[in-house]
Amino acid sequence: LADHALACRDAGAAIARPAAVIDINLSQALDHWKGHVDLSGDALKGKGFVMAAPSGRIAFDGRAARTSGNLRMAAKALTAQGALLRDAGLSGDFVLDAQGNSLKGTLSGDDLHMSNRDPLASLRTAAAGTPVGPLATQLADAVNRAGRANRLRTRFALVQKPSGGSVVVTDAALDARSGARIGLAQDSLVTLSWPGRKGGLDWSLDGALKTG
């Protein structure tokens, strides 16, 4: 299958110039489907993210009310919530239903950076004089030291609902060529949620952050 564009309205996703090999089994009533898609394209856009030159396999099993499955994707670049990751690899299990979408899996890639030159400057300023001020300064300084020559690997659980979404990050580590390192301590997690109380992105840390 090849076309200029392909969209899945229920999943909130669209792919430009897709090429796909589809293997699907349909029930006699056409209300149950199971199979997989080997997919590639120029770009894949979903709710809150864009993948450049994606390729991989998506396996699925479900009905109109609920479909679940797993995916393994690679992309030349991944952008989401103002962050960009090069040579990204994404794998995990997903669920699509009327309440929203969820994806739990792993993410890795190179050269993670934000669109802003000092992406956490506002965090440093806002946290000054508060109990989390030292942690915010430590995190902002570590991100700046890491620069763009770095390697990211993490586990995550993403939930997107009509009213907003969240992602919980665990086992995360960012290693820079400069020697700088940012990572979550054992059993620690970071939660990002949107929209935030002021309309942006809220975050919280449960545990400890290691930098070096």
Image (cartoon, rainbow, N blue to C red):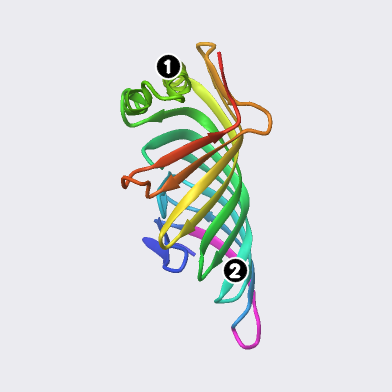
Residue 156 x/y as whole percent: 58, 43
Tag 2, which secondary structure?
strand
Tag 1, which secondary structure?
helix
Vertical relation: 48 (above or below) 21:
above
Marks 2/1: CA–CA distance: 42 Å
Query: Which tag, 2 or 1, sits closer to the chain's start?
Result: 2
Q: Which residues are magenta?
A: 19-30
Residue 63 x/y as whole percent: 60, 76
Whether residue 193 is visible, yes or no, is yes
Q: Report crowding for label 2: few under 14, some 14 to 19, many 20 or more residues within 10 A (C-alpha).
A: some
Q: Which residue is mark 2?
A: 67
The residue at 46%/18% (across/down) is 134
- Camera-nearest residue between 34 and 131: 131
Magenta span includes 21 = yes
Vertical relation: 45 (above or below) 183:
below
Vertical relation: 119 (above or below) 95:
above
Vertical relation: 103 (above or below) 181:
below
Quarter of image, res 96:
bottom right
Q: Pick out the residue farthest to the bottom.
A: 29
The residue at 66%/82% (across/down) is 27
The residue at 37%/50% (across/down) is 195
Whether residue 77 is visible, yes or no, is no
- Camera-nearest residue between 87 and 125: 125
What amino acid type is highlighted by mark number 2?
Thr
Quarter of image, res 200:
top left
What amino acid type is highlighted by mark number 1?
Asp
- Camera-nearest residue between 49 and 118: 118
Magenta span includes 120 = no
Q: Which residue is mark 1?
A: 141
Q: Contact (CB < 8 A) between labels 2 and 1?
A: no
